Image (spheres, rainbow, N blue to C red):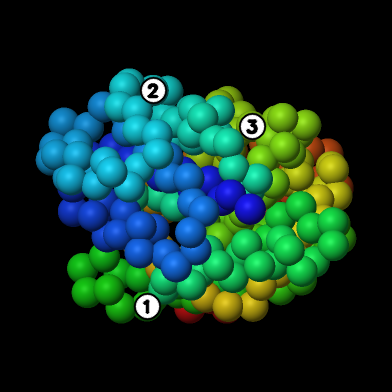
Amino acid sequence: MKISIITVVYNAEQYIKYCIESIINQSYPDIEYIVIDGGSTDRTLEIIERYLQYITHFKSEKDEGLYDAINKGIKLASGDVVGLLNADDMLINNEVISEIANAFTIYPGVEAVHGDLNYINPANMKVVRQWRSYQANRIDVEKGWMPAHPTLYIKRELFQSYGNYALNMGTAADYDLILRYFHTFNLKAVYLPFLMVNMRLGGLSNRNILSLWKAMKFDYKALKRNKIPKALLVLLRKKLSKLNQF
């Protein structure tokens, strides 16, 4: 089973080395690694060039943002399964992809897997939040649940059937895709109860109060678009569920 991993990067010279090394050091042998750069102007491209022998596909060009770049990566992917690892994130150890591939083998009919992640302080690498998920269903989605997106690995064929990341959903494009896959199409996913990813804090949706407000508006738009009942209540539950991560 081939696993395609997509890294989207733009001006991440501080972190890209650690992201790449966490992938190329995986014990699993059949990884297709795709790096999509948005036209970085710092030392990111120089660092990536050191690892080109390990990268299956590399593209550097202007894009329409994070999710446009992810869609480009999905288009290039040829693996049975597709996962994402952002430039400032790292796989927790060298066995993560082996565990993921094994899960697709042992669980009949599984279409996706997901696990746990840590949010870490980029300054000192200390754990700030812990996202621990569980085996969920469509009803849990209606109550505000969602998997940790950086831990989500999906059968590639489903992107052709259910669609890619919507470019008109702002920072909620990942939430919109999760609602579409898990609720609308009732994706058969398995929760793997182990830590997969260290994710540095400081993403697009949580930089300041204004970005948090915009993120909430996009989340609400995603809920309405996917016809989730009682969207405002679900949005509140989604936000409150994060409190126990601290």
Residue at 32 percent across and 54 percent down: it is: 20
Q: Quadrant of residue 161?
A: top right
Residue designated by label 1: 127
Image disc number at residue 113: none
Question: Could you tell me which secondary element the residue under label 1 belongs to?
Answer: strand
**Upstream in sequence: badge 3 or badge 1:** 1
Of badges 3 and 1, the one in the foreground is: 3
**Upstream in sequence: badge 2 or badge 3:** 2
Q: Nearer the viewer, residue 140 or 160?
A: 160
* Amino acid on which the number 1 mark rests in the picture: Val
Q: Is residue 240 above or below residue 186?
A: below
**Upstream in sequence: badge 1 or badge 2:** 2
Residue 94 rendering spot, x and y as whole percentages: 42, 71
Residue 32 visible in the displayed image: yes
Q: Is residue 101 left or right of residue 17?
A: right
Q: Dot 1, crowdedness within 10 Å: few (<14), some or many (≥20)?
A: some
Residue designated by label 2: 63
- Structural distance between the alpha carbons of marks 2 and 3: 16 Å
Q: Dot 3, crowdedness within 10 Å: few (<14), some or many (≥20)?
A: some
- Structural distance between the alpha carbons of marks 1 and 2: 32 Å
Q: Nearer the viewer, residue 240 or 187?
A: 187
Residue 140 rendering spot, x and y as whole percentages: 80, 63
Residue designated by label 3: 164
* Amino acid on which the number 3 mark rests in the picture: Asn
